[in-house]
Image (cartoon, rainbow, N blue to C red):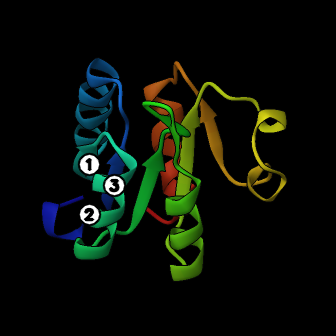
Amino acid sequence: MTAEHSSRVLVVEDEYLLAMLLVDDLQAAGFVPLGPFSTLETALEASRRLTFDMATLDVNLNGQWVYPLADELLTRGIPFLFLTGYAPADMPEKFRALPRLTKPYDAPVLERRLRLLGG
């Protein structure tokens, strides 16, 4: 997959080391990572100004829930994957059936899940 045809992935993650690993794993899989964005405010702003195909969302960003961004992405029809340690039962009901991957994640599984989203 060439860079001009690679899916652009908005990366929302507040843990620095995990964010850097995630960016590296996405690049290795042929995606173009945008970010990481570590706060809800910066992630929302970036999602409104950048063009991207999908997103990975950490559920808890330094004590702020990512759900306002998830709602926006749903409204805009942009697929995303929750990348979180939270179980579905710990999430609001409307988000429980959405794609999610548990941290710590396995890079090949992450790649497969994102390809299923349309990447």
Q: Hey, which quadrant is residue 52 in on the image?
A: bottom left
**Where in the figure is residue 43, as x and y percent of width and height?**
33, 55
User: Is 57 located above or below residue 75 in the figure?
Assistant: above
On screen, residue 94 versus residue 75, left or right, reads: right
Q: Circle 3 is placed at which residue position?
A: 41
Image position, residue 57 (x, y; %): 48, 46
Tell me the kind of residue under disc 3.
Glu
Residue depicted at 73% across the width and 54% down the height? 95
**Circle 1 Cα neighbour tier, 10 Å, few/some/many (<14 / 14–19 / ≥20):** some
Comparing 52 with 58, the one in front is: 58
The residue labelled by disc 2 is 46
Check the picture and name the quadrant holding the C terminus: bottom left
Residue at 49%, 37% in the rendered image: 110
Q: Which of marks 1 and 3 is nearer the N terminus?
A: 1
Q: What residue type is labelled 2?
A: Ala
Residue 97 relative to residue 44: left or right: right
Residue on which disc 1 sits: 30
In the image, farthest residue toward the left = 3
